[in-house]
Amino acid sequence: MRHFQVILLVLISFQISSCAFNPRILKFKKNRTEQTSRTAALFNTDGASAVYNTKVDFYKFHFSGLVAIKRNTASNYDVALISEMGMTLIKMKYVNGKYQDVSVLEELNRPVVINLIQDDLAMLMIDEANFKKKWLTQRSNKVDVMKLKKKGTAPYFLYFKNNLVSRIDKAYAVGKKVQITILNYEEQLPTEISLKHFGLKNASLTFKKLIQNEPNSSDKKDEYDIDE
């Protein structure tokens, strides 16, 4: 009996010690305030689209061109990666958290690069309805944070400023993290986005808005229309 009590005390003390030094527990506290006016969507209106000047750096792969993103619904997007000469390199749909109808130019068909681009772009098209959601507050500066988690995936931490997402973190392994910083908004669409991989050498993406189309603003197609 005494031997069992000693083991129990050791387990309890170990559990308390682990909690005390868990960085996530120290970094955040629960936020029970209703946050109905805030959404994880960076493109928060059906039909909204934008074209961004884009730079992709990944080891020896470097790309400068355009990325066109169009939201059809909260869980349905069209995406295209276009060269500076106007050639479509990658065209795909993002539906319910998965890519469909992926078309890749043969010269660019390098799975490691394609997977990195797809994973990074997916962070710009989060549909919170597909996740278990929890609101937290960052202890250091009282910023409201939305935590999104679903089985089998790394959690997202979305930081809010003036009711808009200002940063997205995804930690997928020890010492490895993807961080998106939204540097500016215009008419509630991000105009400048920086994406950086921590723990993965020479991996980053940057986006600067070139064209913005408001839903139902015009029936005229622009030269980067990705519906065609």
Image (cartoon, rainbow, N blue to C red):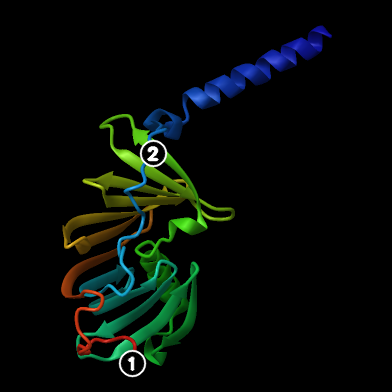
Secondary structure state at the residue bearing disc 1 = loop
In this rendering, position of residue 211 left or right of residue 135: left
Q: Which residue is mark 1?
A: 228
Image location (x, y in percent) of residue 138: 33, 34
* In front: label 1 or label 2: 2
| Amino acid type indicated by mark 2 | Glu
Q: Is residue 109 above or below residue 160?
A: below
Q: Is residue 177 above or below residue 64?
A: above
Image location (x, y in percent) of residue 33: 38, 34
Instruction: Find residue 3 and name its label.
Output: none
Work out whether residue 176 or residue 15 is closer to the camera in this orientation and state it: 15
The residue shown at (47%, 77%) is 111
| Amino acid type indicated by mark 1 | Glu
The residue shown at (43%, 35%) is 24
> Which quarter of the figure is the C terminus placed in?
bottom left
Q: Earlier in the sequence, mark 1 or mark 2?
A: 2
Q: Which residue is mark 2?
A: 34
The residue shown at (23%, 86%) is 224
In this rendering, position of residue 55 left or right of residue 8: left
Please report contact status of discs 1 and 2: CB closer than 8 Å, yes or no. Answer: no
Image location (x, y in percent) of residue 73: 40, 71
Image location (x, y in percent) of residue 121: 36, 68
Q: CA distance from mark 1 to mark 2?
A: 41 Å
Q: Is residue 101 above or below residue 29?
A: below
Work out whether residue 108 or residue 186 is closer to the camera in this orientation and state it: 186
Name the image quarter holding residue 76. bottom left
Structural crowding at the residue carrying mark 1, measured as other residues with C-alpha within 10 Å and reported as few (<14), some (14–19) or many (≥20) = few
Q: Is residue 32 above or below residue 182?
A: above
In this rendering, position of residue 148 left or right of residue 66: right
